[in-house]
Image (tube, rainbow, N blue to C red):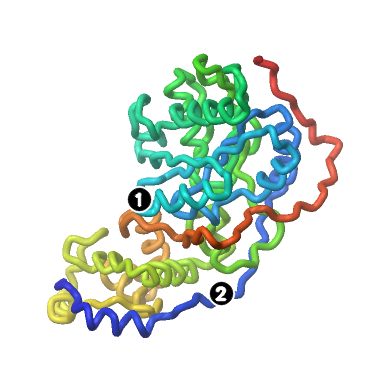
């Protein structure tokens, strides 16, 4: 596939959508998360430093607004934001992201993404982006912020589902010679109970893990809803795969990221298409960026032989394939969120309705390790 003429490319881009039209609403709040929110609100009283993990590909959308609301009542608590899976995002935006949060008086750091082997972060223990190093930096920041001597700090790790928190904590356990690992899995909201462990002596840190907890109520902001679904932070059943694939195509085109065209190269991902007619088409016709999701999914289905039982292109499974290519970083390092300009006012705090505590909720307390 030859390089596309710049003038032709600009003409094509001018015909693409400028906004993504989506009118769905999402309401996903499994029953155990109601109890979890209450647990977090009670546990946070005993915590010094709260670590909020977010996905580097969506540093704004993966904010936990419940946490921000709860922390407004505790000015002596320190929140540190960790952007996980940073090697799947655009590294050129890291400075802009850190500057944005610094302008909001929020301390943030980046962490390496998880390895596909054993769900552990593939970094040496002494690497500056290793989770154990990062939580030590969080303690140092807290002590400096409040001008207090070094003492044991209790940290709480919390996040939306599926931003890599369990693997982040397992990496800390491994570096701390801890044998028991947090459960990992492909579905949002795997961990359902609060657990804790001491991870190091210098400085002395006790970590409390909490389940990934979703935003309560309706998500009625289109891009946030679709971004969270695309990253699998909310159940995939809520938004159709074809809608997510269309949103992904829209976001890639909006950022002039046309690496999805590499899927149609001879050495593209997946099985080679040996159909003679399709090979002739690929050789004789230049494949151009498109804003038409039906056309694109048909091309994907034919290229990788994704057919339904009646031998027609399976657009749903083609969507699943396209989305998986993005999630695995095969479409390049790409950040979904637009980073606000310094002059823009943003907030990640939303109102929280009072919760009625069930008699069987059995809230536990942390051991006193000070």
Q: Secondary structure at mark 2?
A: loop
Q: Which mark is residue 183?
A: none
Image quadrant holding the C terminus, namely top right
Residue depicted at 16% across the width and 72% down the height:
3
Residue 122 image position (x, y, % from top left): 34, 34
- Report the front residue among 338 and 298: 338
Residue depicted at 16% across the width and 74% down the height:
279
Query: What is the quadrant of residue 292 in the picture?
Result: bottom left
- Report the front residue among 238 and 195: 195
Residue depicted at 42% across the width and 72% down the height:
250
Looking at the picture, does residue 64 appear above or below residue 277? above
Left or right: residue 259 versus residue 79 is: left
Classify 10 Å Cα crowding around label 2: few (below 14), some (14-19), many (20 and above).
some
Looking at the picture, does residue 307 appear above or below residue 156? below
Left or right: residue 181 versus residue 92 is: right
- Report the front residue among 307 and 91: 91
Q: Given this view, does label 2 or label 1 mark the residue nearer the observer?
A: 1
Query: What is the quadrant of residue 45 in the picture?
Result: top right
Residue 333 image position (x, y, % from top left): 34, 55
Answer with mark 2 or mark 1, whichever residue precedes in sequence: 2
Classify 10 Å Cα crowding around label 1: few (below 14), some (14-19), many (20 and above).
some
Q: Is residue 195 visible?
A: no
Label 2 sits on residue: 22
Label 1 sits on residue: 91
Q: CA distance from mark 2 to mark 1?
A: 29 Å
Q: Secondary structure at mark 1?
A: helix
Looking at the picture, does residue 108 appear above or below residue 278? above
Left or right: residue 63 versus residue 273 is: right
């Amino acid at each position: 596939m030859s390089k596309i003429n710049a003038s032709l490319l600009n003409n094509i881009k001018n015909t693409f959508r400028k906004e993504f039209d989506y009118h769905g609403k999402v309401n996903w709040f499994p029953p155990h998360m109601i109890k979890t929110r209450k647990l977090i609100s009670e546990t946070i009283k005993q915590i010094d430093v709260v670590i909020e993990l977010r996905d580097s590909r969506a540093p704004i959308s993966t904010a936990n607004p419940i946490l921000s609301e709860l922390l407004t009542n505790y000015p002596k608590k320190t929140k540190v934001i960790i952007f996980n899976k940073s090697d799947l995002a655009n590294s050129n935006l890291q400075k802009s992201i850190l500057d944005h949060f610094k302008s909001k008086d929020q301390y943030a750091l980046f962490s390496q993404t998880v390895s596909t082997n054993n769900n552990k972060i593939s970094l040496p223990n002494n690497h500056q982006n290793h989770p154990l190093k990062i939580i030590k930096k969080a303690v140092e920041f807290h002590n400096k912020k409040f001008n207090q001597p070094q003492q044991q700090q209790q940290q709480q790790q919390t996040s939306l589902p599926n931003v890599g928190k369990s693997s982040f904590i397992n990496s800390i356990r491994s570096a701390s010679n801890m044998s028991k690992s947090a459960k990992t899995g492909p579905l949002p909201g795997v961990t359902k109970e609060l657990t804790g462990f001491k991870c190091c002596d210098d400085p002395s840190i006790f970590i409390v893990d909490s389940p990934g907890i979703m935003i309560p109520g309706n998500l009625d902001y289109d891009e946030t809803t679709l971004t969270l679904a695309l990253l699998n932070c909310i159940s995939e059943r809520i938004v159709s795969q074809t809608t997510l694939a269309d949103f992904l195509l829209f976001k890639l085109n909006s950022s002039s990221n046309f690496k999805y065209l590499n899927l149609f190269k001879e050495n593209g991902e997946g099985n080679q298409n040996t159909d003679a007619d399709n090979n002739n088409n690929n050789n004789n016709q230049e494949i151009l960026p498109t804003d038409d999701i039906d056309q694109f999914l048909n091309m994907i289905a034919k290229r990788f032989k994704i057919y339904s039982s009646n031998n027609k292109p399976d657009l749903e499974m083609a969507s699943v394939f396209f989305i998986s290519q993005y999630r695995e970083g095969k479409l390049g390092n790409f950040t979904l969120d637009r980073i606000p300009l310094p002059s823009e006012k943003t907030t990640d705090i939303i109102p929280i309705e009072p919760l009625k505590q069930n008699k069987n909720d059995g809230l536990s307390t942390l051991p006193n390790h000070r």
